[in-house]
Structure formats: C-alpha cells, structure tokens
Image (cartoon, rainbow, N blue to C red):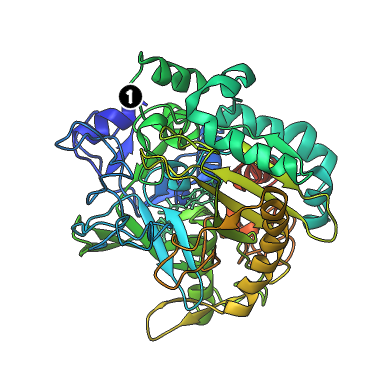
Amino acid sequence: MAALQTAAALGLTRIGLQSAHAAEPAAVDNSPAIVIGSGYGAAVAALRLGQAGIRTLVIEMGGLWNTPGPDGKVFCSTRTPDQRSMWFRTRTEAPLATFLWLDVVNKDISPYPGVLDRVRFANMSVFVGRGVGGGSLVNGSMAVTPPQSYFAEQFPTVDTAEMYSTYFPRARSMLGVNTVDPAWFESTEWYRFTRISRKHAQNAGLKTTFVPSVYDFGHMQREAAGTATRSALAGEVIYGNNHGKRSLDKTYLASALGTGNVTIHTMERAKGIRRASDGTYVVTVDRIDNTGKVVETKEYGCTYLFLGGGSLGTTELLVRAQETGTLPALNASVGAGWGTNGNVMLGRANHLWDTVGENQSTMPVMGIDDWANTSNPVFAEIAPLPTGLEHWVSLYLAITKNPQRASFTYDSATDSAKLGWSAAQSAVSVSMAKKLFDRINSANSTIYRYDLFGSSSKVFADDFTYHPLGGCVLGRATDDYGRVKGYSKLYVTDGSLVPGSIGVNPFVTITALAERTMARVLVEDTAP
Ligand code: FAE
C-alpha cells in the first residue's frame, strides 16, 4: 500500500517497490511473467507469481486511483460526478438514465481517464472499471458464492468439492469478505429501503438472503455514528469509494507489490500479442496520456503471459491475435460463450406509506433468492437508489438464468471486437425478471416505475450488464485450468473463463477460479 501511495504522489506510471523509491529503472522490456489488467483474475495472478519469486510486470490501461483531486478526494460521488467518473466521456452515462423522465442524472464532464467505462456494442453495453483494481474500484462489493449445484452445472470438469473447500474460502479470506450485523441492519435508517423490499418479497412468498460484502461494515457503522468519513453513506459507489471498500488495491495488489517482485505500469493498453521464435511472448502496448493520446508504443517480452483484462479486454486481445494471425493456433472457441449473467435492472413504485428513506447506503446487503425455482430461476439484488430524497422506489438488479450466449468477432475496420448479441436475447432475461416481479407487484398491489430508464418509459433495463462473462471459456478455449489451447505458458485468469452465467454477482467466483489456476500452474508449469 505504501508503494502505491508513494508512486501516486510522485505521479509515476510505474509502480513497484523499487520504482517507487529510486529514479525509474530502465524499461522492463523482458520479465519472466506479464499480467495484463489488474482486476480480480489479474490481481490473483500477480500476487501468486510474486510470492513464487517470479518477477512480474502488470500492465493496466487505467490509472492509479490514489491521488486526491482539488476537492481532497480521490473519487467523485454519484451525485456530483466530474471528469474522474467516466473513461473519456463528455457526459456521464449512468445506468439509471432519468428520474421522473427528467434528464437529471447525467452530467457534462470533461474527457479524462475516469474510473468507470461503458463499452457500447450494438444491442448491449457493458460497464467495467478502469484503473489499478479493475472492477473492484466501481462495483457494489457484493461478495457472493454461487450455489454449489449451479457452479457444478456451469463447470462440469472442475472438482467442485475442492473449489468449495479450498478456493472459495481462500478467495473470500483474501478479499476481506464480511457481513452486515443483522441487529444494526434491522434498526438503521440506511437500510430501510432493503427492509421494505424484503417485506414485499415475503408478501409474495419469496425468500430473501443476506449477501456478504467487501465493504467494511465496521467502517459503515462508524459512518452512521458520525465517527468516520462517509463513503457508502455519502452516495459513493460506481465512480469509486473514498473509504470503507476493500478494493483490490488494498488487498491482493497491495500484497503483490509487497513481495517486491511485482511492478505495475498504468495507462498502458496492451493491444497485440505475438510469439517470438524462441517461444516467448511479445506484448505490444500503447501508453496513453490523460487526453487519451498514444504517447508511446512499446514492446515487452515474457516467458509466461497471463491475460486478466476481463471478459471484454482478454477476449478482444485474443480474437485480434487470432484474426491478424499473430496467434494462429488459437481454437474456434475463442470469442464464444459470452453472456450477461442474465442482468436486468428495474424499479417498483411503492405505496406512499412504504417509504424507502432519504438515507440509503450504496452497498447492497440482501437478495431475493428464487434460484431454486426451476421454472424461473432468478436471484435479485435489492439495490439502493441514494438520491438523498424520499422517492418511494424499490430498485433491483435481477440475475436471471438466461441461456442465451453470443460471440465476439474481430472487426478489422475498427481494430476492435464486435459482439453479436441481439435484443431478442435480452428479452429472455426480461421475461424471467418480469415473472418474478409481477408476482411481487401483485402480492403488494404495486406497479413498476416507468421513468428511470429514458424517455421511452422503459421498465426493464435490459440493454446493459455489470457482469460480462465468457469469451474464453474454461475447458473450451482453454484447458480446465485456464491454459489457452494451442499455446503453452499462455493463461486466462479472469471473467472470460465463466460461461456466460454464474447465478450470482461474479467476482468471488472469478477470484476463486484464478486461485485454482495459479495453484496448479505454479506447481506444474514453472518447474525448471
Ligand atoms: P476486471 O475487474 O474488469 O479487470 C480488468 C482490468 O483490465 C481493468 O482494470 C481494465 O482496465 C484492464 N484492461 C482491460 N483491457 C486491457 C488491455 N488491453 N490492456 C491493459 N489493461 C486492460 O476483470 N460483481 C460482484 O461480484 N459484486 C458486485 O457487487 C458487483 N457490482 C458491480 C457494479 C458495477 C457498476 C460493475 C461495473 C460491476 C460490478 N460487478 C460486481 C462485476 C465485477 O466487478 C466484475 O465481474 C469483475 O470486476 C470482473 O473481474 P475480471 O478479473 O474479469
């Protein structure tokens, strides 16, 4: 952590125990290992490589989020977004577009490498985090382990017992997962919105369940008591949290830097991968500045290459390498098996007496769990809408068991990956979410909100996902441990391994799978 702070203070784009102290070393053109990205899968890889004594370079296209802006804060809040909010935009593009059909949510901003990106494809846009820590910087901290039977269904070749006895517990412990104190939850004004949604679910005969989190609930209770600076209780979440959240820069990545073997380069975007004649990998990287301009293009070599750019980042690198012929032996499954985890967002309008409270914590702590309903499996997170005003809205992010999958292909005209997802594929998620929430509305004589997702009175926001999964699926594009088929010493460790759906919020699964990969690879592949 100290290394991260020192480096940020010096304005360095290279972060490591050595580079944080001395003048910058000569460019690390060759490292035994390179990790692309710094989200969950990448952070696990970096730590375990560093602990194994393997010098490792982490390449992250976003910035290091550790330097306070003029307001003394590192991140801006959802209520007053500024340039720090989004990745090179002139206006924010929040998931909730309108309130009472009014365009009051989004704000004009100046283009800057902000922390949240919304990557737009034809019928689907994907929210991702940018910066050291990837999605951990912007997500809702919900740290959920999937039902064992569903994990087994999605990963038939993985030893499920070992996952649940070893790798899930390891991931939860490293991530700092904790749970809200039930007594405080029942009494605090900050979770009134959740209790109301629970009541309405129970009225429909549905089960709710507490959801663990990587937000420090001790800190949150101190926020409520007025003895700690507010973050979750001050509307901070999708543009970053200034306090309380155990994001990866405070857990895995801090420990990775602590090994002394790991260096992080920020504002460097990997764009090409090829194999040299001696079998090592060469990664071509564009270094960008705060205007997005490419200021340098360089190449790094390595023996072991770990891809952790997330479902979008990793898959794009691989389909580009496949189509441009730099990694011609990649198999036909590369780019395939992508899904949205069945994500649909929606709001319900409550009766006047069912107030949700003007004070709402940004960290969800409960879900409506109807996953066991085989005719319509849905797990719906009870989401906050922290406007600071009473609005009588119950908001949800539903995770549905949508079996639809799509593929990425390489588009040479734009040099980027294109996603073949159709609106009809989203409609499958909507019909599942609608069945569940029609039931809740009917039991409570309530209706949907029509004013939250744009002027078209859309009820179900089915055109974005927080949970991009797949593109390089475990056991298909890779072997059962994330080794990319057709190549040796090339690995995928991120959400692209998950075949489109995991039934709950995905980061604990991604982390646990990466732990499993690293445990195997370090024993089998790095022996002299
Ligand atoms: P990810 O965390 O996306 O990291 C990829 C990193 O690689 C990023 O930092 C990229 O900038 C970087 N990168 C990409 N391409 C390149 C390249 N070419 N060169 C260099 N760097 C590159 O990957 N999940 C939960 O489990 N619980 C939640 O409560 C939750 N809430 C969410 C809320 C929001 C608003 C969002 C956007 C996501 C949420 N998620 C949640 C999803 C979760 O953050 C996501 O599944 C993980 O972050 C994915 O982890 P990966 O390791 O796959």
Q: Judge by depth and name the residue closer to the eye, 397 or 275.
A: 397
Location of the C terminus (image quadrant): top right
Residue placed farthest to the bottom in the image? 413
**Residue 457: x and y, percent?**
47, 69
**Residue 244: x and y, percent?**
42, 27
Amino acid at pointer 1: Ala
Q: Is residue 478 left or right of residue 270?
A: right
Q: Is residue 183 left or right of residue 281?
A: right
Residue at image x 30%, y 47%?
63
Residue at image x 33%, y 45%?
78
Q: Is mark 1 on a helix, strand or loop?
A: helix
* Residue 68 image-quadrant placement: top left
* Residue 261 image-quadrant placement: top left
Q: Mark 1 points at which residue?
A: 2
Residue placed farthest to the left in the image? 70
Using the rendered image of the protein, determine whether residue 510 is visible from the camera's viewpoint. no
Q: Judge by depth and name the residue closer to the eye, 409 or 299.
A: 409
